[in-house]
Image: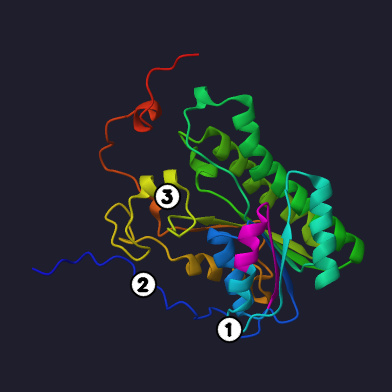
Amino acid sequence: MENPLRGLPAPPALGAAALPPGTYAGQVVLVTGGGTGLGKAIAAEFARLGADVVIASRRAEQLKAAREELAAVPGAGRVAAAVCDIRDPERVAEVFDAAQAAFGLPDVLVNNAAANFPAPAEDLSPNAWRAVVDITLTGTWFMTREFGRRHLTAGTPGSIVNIGASYAWTGGPGFAHSSAAKAGVKNLVETLAVEWGPYGIQINGLVPGLFPHADMTEDIRSGLERAAPDAKDARQPALRVGAPRELGWAATFLASPYARFITGHTLVVDGANWQRRSVVNPEVVPVRTQLGRGPFAP
């Protein structure tokens, strides 16, 4: 008998677009963490639709390569890169100044930059906690605040997309620092949608599932144990993982003219994996054991 489990179909090929060509022509899109990984994949889809794209990251060498790659995307507008540590509000103001001088005030902000690593909560030092929360939550807030203040001053509309995580709802054992920060990011979406909606500024969240890519950290790569982005995966309801372009398509829709009445919403793009439950719960394995840590020793 033929196996009835097929999983969700594969996405259209790389280079396809979910929106009409030129949707973002004349628009400026600023993407933090845009030099690598999913940030770069998101920037590529905005570029494909004609946007002038500014990518920001702390590492100049990554930005140079990404800028060249994005400029070669068919249909792309202009591409600029800016080194920025989003934890520093002065540097954040400078990256907006640079974007505005190059192309104009960004119409769209994608808050993608974040930090994360697995650790039992009791092992997190004050510096480890701050390293993640300061980038993921505080840095996102600094970028969002600068974007909002500039548009409020100019009297112009704008759109923000915050990259979140499903454990903002569920909690994230092994990631207490990141899950707390992402819960804050999600709440910013819901709070600012109400505060800034009257001024024409929309803000939404976008939560990625498993999207393997070349720039994953080694701890994530080894944990996923995936061979390729389109590999079958029996641990996912979709029976596959995501292709980075699928996240890019979702981002371009949320910030587009076709989603103007969507604000304060967080869209999860993960093939329903975060909603999966077992009929019979598996045995509980403590986080320390899962991460190969010995007994806690202060």
User: Does residue 208 appear left or right of residue 101 in this picture?
Assistant: left
Could you tell me residue 137's position as x and y percent?
67, 43
Mark 3 element type: helix
Figure quadrant of the N terminus: bottom left
User: Does residue 92 appear left or right of residue 29 in this picture?
Assistant: right
Residue 217 visible in image: yes
Indicate the quadrant where residue 27 lies: bottom right
Choose the circle earlier in sequence order: 2 or 3: 2
- Check whether the beta carbons of the residues at disc 2 and disc 1 lie within 8 A of each other: no
Tell which residue pokes out farthest to the front in this image: 61
- At horizontal 30% and vertical 51% (from top left) the residue drawn is 235
Choose the circle earlier in sequence order: 3 or 1: 1
Could you tell me residue 167's position as x and y percent?
50, 43
Other residues around mark 2 within 10 Å, as few (<14) / some (14–19) / many (≥20)? few
Amino acid tagged 3: Trp
- Residue placed under numbered mark 3 in the picture: 274
Could you tell me residue 281's position as x and y percent?
28, 36
The residue range painted magenta reads 51-66
Indicate the quadrant where residue 264 lies: bottom right
Q: Mark 2 or mark 1, which is nearer to you?
A: 1
| The stretch drawn in magenta includes residue 57 | yes
Residue 171 is marked as: none
- At horizontal 51% and vertical 24% (from top left) the residue drawn is 123
Residue 104 visible in image: no
Q: CA distance from mark 3 to mark 1?
A: 34 Å
Other residues around mark 3 within 10 Å, as few (<14) / some (14–19) / many (≥20)? some
- Residue placed under numbered mark 1 in the picture: 74
Mark 1 element type: loop
Q: CA distance from mark 2 to mark 3?
A: 19 Å
Residue 10 is marked as: 2
Amino acid tagged 1: Pro
Amino acid tagged 2: Ala
